[in-house]
Image (cartoon, rainbow, N blue to C red):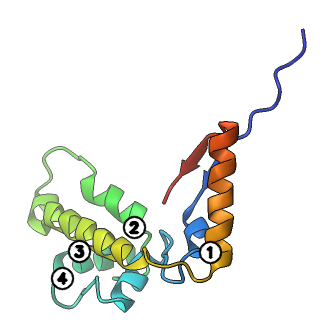
Amino acid sequence: MEPPPPAVCFVLGAGFSCAFSPGAPTMADFLARAAANGAYKPESDHRTLASIAEKYFGSTRDVNIEDLASFLVLDLGSDPAKEKELRNLAYDQLIQIICQTLGYIHGPAMSSDPADEFSSFATLLAREGIPAITFN
């Protein structure tokens, strides 16, 4: 019996989107980019989120949003500090920032080259039945 042919699966991260849009953030620079485009306002609208990010991650902008989101929803049972810090509110603020920032980046491609490449890539995946996992 012959072994099955090797399987192909593409795993696409945030860097994949960066080729398409100059405003596409990565997990690591998401808040900094969101602040630059006005979606994140740590000194006013998003003080609760900014305070928690500063306290636990040492920065209001240079925080990996995946780490921050996980921290905000971590269930430690009854935790008075969590309730006092309003982590639920901070999580809601983070979701709002993510939605606004992603809405900002999805526009025309930087050039036709990435758009054509992405279209060809998607066509290949569909035609050959190749799975893709995306973290975008």
The residue lying toward the viewer, choosing from 96 and 121, is 121
Residue 59 can be seen, yes or no: no
Identify residue for label 2: 65
Identify residue for label 3: 49
Q: Is residue 103 left or right of residue 76?
A: right
Q: Quadrant of residue 98?
A: bottom left
Question: Mark 1 or mark 2: which is in front?
Answer: 1
Q: Amino acid at mark 3?
A: Leu
Whether label 1 touches label 2, CB < 8 Å = no
Alpha-carbon distance for marks 3 and 1? Answer: 29 Å
Identify residue for label 4: 47
Question: Mark 3 or mark 1: which is in front?
Answer: 1
Alpha-carbon distance for marks 1 and 2? Answer: 21 Å
- What kind of element bears circle 1? loop
- Residue 76: where, in percent of width, then height? 23, 47
- What kind of element bears circle 4? helix
Measuring 10% from the left and 59% from the top, which residue is drawn there? 83
Whether label 3 touches label 4, CB < 8 Å = yes
The image shows residue 104, relative to residue 12, as above or below, that is: below
Whether label 3 touches label 1, CB < 8 Å = no
